[in-house]
Image: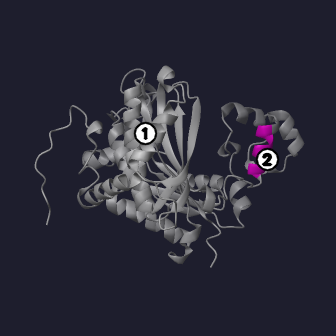
Amino acid sequence: MSGFAERIAHLDMDAFFVEVERRRRPDLIGKAVLVGGAGDRGVVASASYEARRRGVRSGMPMVHARRLVPHGTVVPPNHSAYREVSDRVFEILETFTPSIEQVSVDEAFLDIGGLRLHYESPSVCAEAMRSAIRAELSLPSSVGIATTRLLAKMASRDAKPDGVLVVEAGTELDYLHPQPVESLWGVGEATRARIEELGIKTVGEMAAFPRETLVRRLGDSLGNMLWNLAHARDDTARTDTSSARSISVEATYETDLADLDAMNRELLAHADKLSSRLRRAGFVASTITLKVRYPDFTTVSRSHTFSAPVSTSAEINEVSCRLLGRTAAHRRGVRLLGIGAWGLVNVDQPRQLGFESGAWEEIDEAVEEVRSRFGSEAIRRARLLRSEDPEPGPPTLGR
């Protein structure tokens, strides 16, 4: 049986920072909430839908947002809490499919084509994912499903808040063409102004425009890309999951990391999480990729391919630190660090065994067993303990 035709799902958590804060503070439910800096230079990191209905948007100066919702509640961001909850969200998604591309702390693309044997339709699959997240974490999410990544992301936007929208195969242009041109990837304010000078306001009008004229106006690369997107031709959509699937972990830091030791600690934490995700998904990785974003938003990547696939946190951490040494991180500082596992191989497939990995595999298996029984914080690496963490007391075992 073939998979779903609409195989690309885009899951986006609704007002993620706000909803995480509401888990801790139920008094915020139903109120206009602004997560972000409260000072004169503060910006809105996330806004509740009560505030959004008054015109507040993420990235808006907090001073402006407070004028729109003078009685709104401003909450300082707690990024460590958001990362912890985000990890749980992705752990839940991995129980559905290992074919996940994490876009940010609160959104991801998933290939659900192979889940046709488990769910009668893409929408039923999407509702199952949303229900699992709500049951486990009491958080709302929205899912868009389509044949391409662009359409799936647009559909999740239109499904908000707390909904599902499927763009059925064969109806792509009916859905896409009435959309404004700024819905397309690569169309910011400046590009939109240049496009509107041609009299183009909708995607359908762009699709009907001569490609050559668009290329002359916007340049070869952008012009061709937008013309193709306007015809629902998205080359990034139909991923061959047998060769390109990956699992990744990354974090953006509120304060840039300038100390190499701090960067290595973050890589150790990432390696620990990535190893755990690989183990739960039943894969080993042929290639590890490091992603580094500098304070000026320049992003670089480095990768290493192993002679035999790996999955242990020790192996992933060792190669990640070596890859970091091949960047300018120690001179420029770091805004974002990420590790990705590529070339995934089922752990049950025959593979070359090494001489040193056995002990680390046994350690990781023991750690995973403890965490599965008592929670992700039940056992932690000593190097990742902060000075303000409480001293561990005697273990308490549940019945």
Residue bearing the label numbered 2: 227
Q: Regarding mark 2 in the picture, which secondary structure is present there?
A: helix
Residue under label 1: 46
Protein image colouring: one colour
Determine the image quadrant of residue 301.
Answer: top right
Provide the residue span drawn in magenta. 221-230
Instruction: Assess whether mark 1 and mark 2 are in contact (beta carbons under 8 angstroms).
Output: no
Image spot of residue 389 (x, y percent): 20, 37
Query: Residue at the location (14% across, 62% down)?
Result: 398
Report how far apart the C-alphas of labels 2 and 1 lie in the structure. Answer: 33 Å
Q: Position of residue 84 (x, y in %)?
A: 34, 46
Give the position of the N terminus as an image quadrant. bottom right
Disc 1, SS: strand
Residue lying furthest front in this view? 355
Please indicate, yes or no, whether residue 258 appears anywhere in the rendered image.
Answer: yes
* Residue shown at 51% from the left, 21% from the top: 332
